[in-house]
Image (cartoon, rainbow, N blue to C red):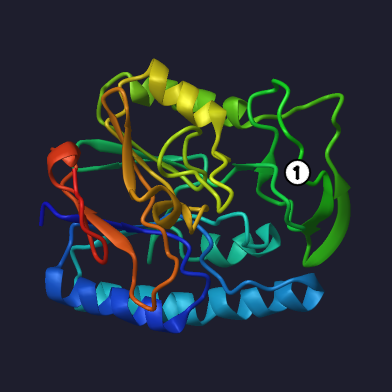
């Protein structure tokens, strides 16, 4: 039961959720963490409704099957930048029962603090619910205009290039007291900037500078991230280090198999195993 499992970016793919249920039934992990982009990619108002059906139906059934097959497993999850935020009530309805929500929270398990953050730096994509300026410093603005969701409806949104606030750095600040213990596991949908885990196809680094700054200033042993699906294929590595911090991005890309990482939180630097790729720490 020392094994924990992390995956991200399943995007509502039933086959991947089925594989995860199977893994849980066989391995009986202590914890399963889903790092964002839970629902199928869907745009427009119809997309909001489509994701809502998934979250209220398929995701709930998945969580119940996890509970039935492995009662001692704790399921933790949060939304990612491709999940419409107006549907958060679907997740809140089962928070503390079927799963633990992580976004902007710290959850305690077995002496560890698990903190989650769905925010990502501004992307070229249209859904802006989970995007923020990174650290307030000048940064490439890939697409300032898009859509946010409230009350089941979409609303035009444009980031203010003059104000550059609020930031991801602001959202990380409340985690600082938990980070001093050296037992904080940070789950950020965006990987930290400048690692093997945040490269897009052009080989450019697009991760969060704020996340990197946070782990550089605090004794965080492990960062679990996703978002940049192709990064492990582009960089050739699904993990990296920032000083003593191990950074992971399973990279759900280019395979029909579930990409995820097993680890022991007591010694993450010596226990990482990927479900598909070789090359653990």
Looking at the picture, tell me which residue is in the foreground, 31 or 12: 12
SS for dot 1: loop
The quarter of the picture where residue 23 lies is: bottom left
Q: Is residue 95 above or below residue 122?
A: below
Vertical arrangement, residue 45 with respect to residue 164, above or below? below
Q: Which is nearer the eye, 123 or 11?
A: 123
Q: Looking at the image, which residue is at 70% across and 22% down?
A: 136
Q: Tell me the quarter of the image containing the N terminus.
A: bottom left
User: For the point 52% across and 40% down, which residue is it?
Assistant: 104
On screen, residue 64 above or below 118: below
Compare residues 281 and 160 and report the one nearer the observer: 281
Q: Residue at x 33, y 48 (%)?
A: 237
Left or right: residue 160 compared with residue 240 = right
Residue 33 rendering spot, x and y as whole percentages: 35, 56
Circle 1 residue? 142
Residue for point 47% across, 27% down: 212
Which residue appears farthest toward the front when viewing the image?
202
Q: Is residue 171 left or right of residue 275?
A: right
Viewport quadrant of the C terminus = top left
Question: How far from the left and from the top, in percent, is residue 171?
Answer: 58, 31
x and y, in percent, of residue 78 in the image: 49, 55
Q: Is residue 260 left or right of residue 170?
A: left
């Amino acid at each position: 039961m020392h094994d924990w499992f992390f995956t991200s970016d399943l995007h509502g793919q039933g086959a991947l959720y089925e594989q995860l249920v199977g893994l849980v039934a066989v391995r009986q992990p202590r914890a399963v963490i889903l790092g964002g982009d839970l629902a199928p990619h869907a745009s427009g108002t119809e997309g909001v409704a489509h994701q809502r059906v998934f979250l209220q139906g398929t995701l709930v059934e998945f969580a119940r099957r996890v509970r039935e097959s492995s009662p001692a497993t704790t399921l933790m999850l949060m939304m990612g930048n491709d999940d419409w935020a107006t549907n958060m009530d679907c997740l809140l309805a089962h928070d503390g029962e079927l799963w633990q929500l992580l976004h902007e929270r710290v959850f305690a398990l077995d002496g560890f603090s698990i903190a989650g953050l769905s925010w990502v730096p501004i992307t070229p994509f249209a859904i802006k619910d989970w995007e923020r300026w990174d650290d307030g410093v000048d940064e490439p603005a890939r697409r300032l205009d898009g859509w946010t969701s409230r009350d089941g409806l979409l609303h035009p949104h444009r980031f203010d290039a003059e104000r550059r606030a609020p930031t991801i750095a602001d959202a990380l600040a409340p985690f600082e007291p938990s980070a001093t213990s050296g037992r904080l596991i940070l789950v950020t949908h965006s990987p930290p900037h400048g690692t093997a885990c945040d490269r897009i196809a052009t080989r450019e680094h697009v991760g969060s500078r704020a996340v990197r700054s946070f782990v550089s200033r605090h004794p965080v042993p492990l960062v679990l991230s996703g978002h940049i699906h192709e990064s492990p294929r582009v960089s050739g590595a699904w993990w990296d280090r920032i000083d003593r911090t191990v950074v992971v991005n399973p990279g759900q890309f280019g395979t029909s198999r579930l990409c995820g990482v097993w680890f022991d939180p007591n010694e993450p630097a010596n226990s990482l195993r990927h479900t598909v790729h070789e090359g653990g720490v």
